[in-house]
Image (cartoon, coloured by chain):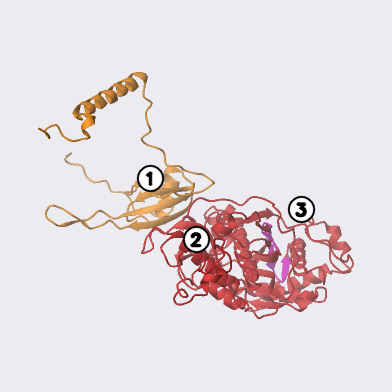
Chain colours: A orange, B red
Amino acid sequence: MATGVRKAVYPLFQLGGPQLRIFRPNFFMLAVRPGVPQPEDTVQFRVSMEMTKVDIKNYLEKIYNVPVAAVRTRIQYGANNKRNHKNQRVKKPDYKVAYVQLGQGQTFQFPNLFPEKEQDAEARSFDDFKDKYMEREKQRQKGDPRRGGVPDWFGL
Amino acid sequence: MAAFGGRRLLWHGRCWFSQTESSVSSQPSDSLYPPIVASATAKSKAAKRRRLEHFNQRVHAAASIEEKLRLYGQLQRPKYMVYPQTFALNADRWYRSFTKTVFVPGLPPAAVAPEAAKAPEPAAAAPGAAKSPEAAAEAAPNLDVDELRSLACDALLQESFYQNKKRPFLYRDQDHTPGPFLTQLVSTLAAFLCGRNPLLAASSLDLKPEVNYYWHHGEEVVVHGHRKGRVDPVRFQIDDNPHLQIRVPKQLPEIVPLDSDLGDVPVIDHKPSKLPLFKKQYENKVFIGSKVADPCCYGHTQFHLIPDKLKRERFLRVNLEDQIEVLYRANGIASLFAWTAAQAMYQGFWNEADVTRPFVSQAVVTDGRYFAFFCYQLNTLALTVETIQNNPRKNICWGTDSQPLYDVVEDGNVKGFNDEVLLKLVHFLLNRPKEL
């Protein structure tokens, strides 16, 4: 901690005056994959509970240059039914969901974040070998098929 | 597939229903045993179908139109409320998919005038083409454009300049000047044109009427509640309040034949709630503006006023200029579909008994200065899942973009008066069946 640093004093800002400070908003927006299919121009976000529709519109337009045509929000109540080892109720946190409709005919499709990787020939042959080995092990564990699943120790 | 309802009441102690069944295996009529049919009360698909069939027969056999409408809307369930005047983005595309409507830009090529001497020249000869000024000059001996213009300007100046009104209350601008201006304009023009169009003389002009229609379209699975998991039809209800409405005793002529195909109907896979559209459960009303016994049971023209919340300036402020035309189109399509379909139901047609002749109506959507004209031809009412499968017919809506009637009113003068818009309006009012 630096000693002797005095907090800088800025003049009060009034409309039209010089902008000496820039405040970064303390809000965060998280783009999520919609649980139910949404129209192509709709993007779903989880936003801070204190954000309003106007805030969301300005946030996206000013910071990310995304044209926003309409915003609808709702608050998702987090359930309070689960219990911990002390039988106390554990609440899942509430969060606000925003459905943003993009302007100028833009569309958005939530990307697939975990695509299937192409396996090269080596990996594929190793997987085949592994599957065959597991199959052989299972066959060895099983008893004589003529006994119809009855264990070995049963009998005379 | 859920029936429209009424199936729960009549199964106890009534044995006549067994004779109404048509799905009987072939048995000679002198057989000792009753016909073998599926159960009517079991929890099975055959029983469901049988109840549905019984309900349809009850509606077909209803004694009067009121009884038919009562049975049609008897079962109340949550339904989507469709508002014709909506701020939702791209609402006209969604509404076209709900009502199986094709939108054709521009007005239809007007019907050939029966006697050239009597009728005025059509205002819109080709879709979207500008009207030729010569046509107006030729029709001058029959249709005095100056007289009409002076009537319109008088109404406008009276409402906005001469009459001393206090300042409009907050968000009541539309009721202050454009509303009374529209009423005055339409009533004076209709009275002036009565001589030319005898249909107008027999018409009925409604002020702020109510128009309602209830229909099913498509299917969905019930998400929560005690009916979870069942497959239900998607129900819609339009409750519209046009500013003015002209109802006539004779129907307007068809514009194109019943089975014409003028375009495609958009298919939207998403649920209507994504529009956004919300559900509520209340009375399933079908109403054209007057009760069934009224002789003026066909529609002629509706006039809609855009409310303050949906004015042009609001759209321009949030950079949504393209949605202005969407609003006008959505209003035209939804309101006219509800009106024409309700008129068809008043004549006894419904989705199992599809219309045999097209129902035509017109509408003018305005915010006081900008006017947009719409024509609608209802070719089919069969929009439910069973009836839409083999139904190639589509409803058709013609519509124009909004054009200003005048630029500004200053010092007792109307600047920039647009004769084309006025002539289109007059042409709409003069529309009549060929016999008259």
- Frontmost residue, B389 versus A34: B389
Task: Give the number of the disc on residue B221.
Answer: none
- Residue B423 coordinates in the image, percent (x, y): 77, 64
Circle 3 sits on which residue? B129
Task: Residue type at mark 1: give it.
Answer: Ala
Quadrant housing the C terminus of chain A = top left
The chain letter for the residue carrying disc 2 is B
The chain letter for the residue carrying disc 3 is B
- Frontmost residue, B134 versus B258: B258
The chain letter for the residue carrying disc 1 is A
Q: Quadrant of residue A31?
A: top left
Q: Is B281 included in the stretch rendered in magenta?
A: no
Q: Judging from the image, what secondary structure is the residue with disc 3 in?
A: loop
Q: Residues at badges 2 and 1 in contact (C-beta under 8 Å)?
A: no
Quick check: do tags 3 and 2 share a chain?
yes
Is B382 rendered above or below residue B30? above
Q: Residues at badges 3 and 2 in contact (C-beta under 8 Å)?
A: no
> In the figure, is residue B20 to the left or right of B232?
right
Circle 1 sits on which residue? A31
Task: Residue type at mark 2: give it.
Answer: Val
Q: Which residues are drawn in magenta?
A: B399-414
Circle 2 sits on which residue? B234
Within 10 angstroms of label 3, few (less than 14), some, or many (20 or more) residues? few
| Residue B142 in view | yes
- Frontmost residue, A68 versus A61: A68
Which residue is at 52% across, 72% downward? B17
Is A32 rendered above or below residue A124? below
C-alpha distance separating marks 2 and 1:
31 Å
Which residue is at 63% across, 55% downward? B391
> In the figure, is residue A73 to the left or right of B385?
left
Task: Residue type at mark 3: give it.
Answer: Ala
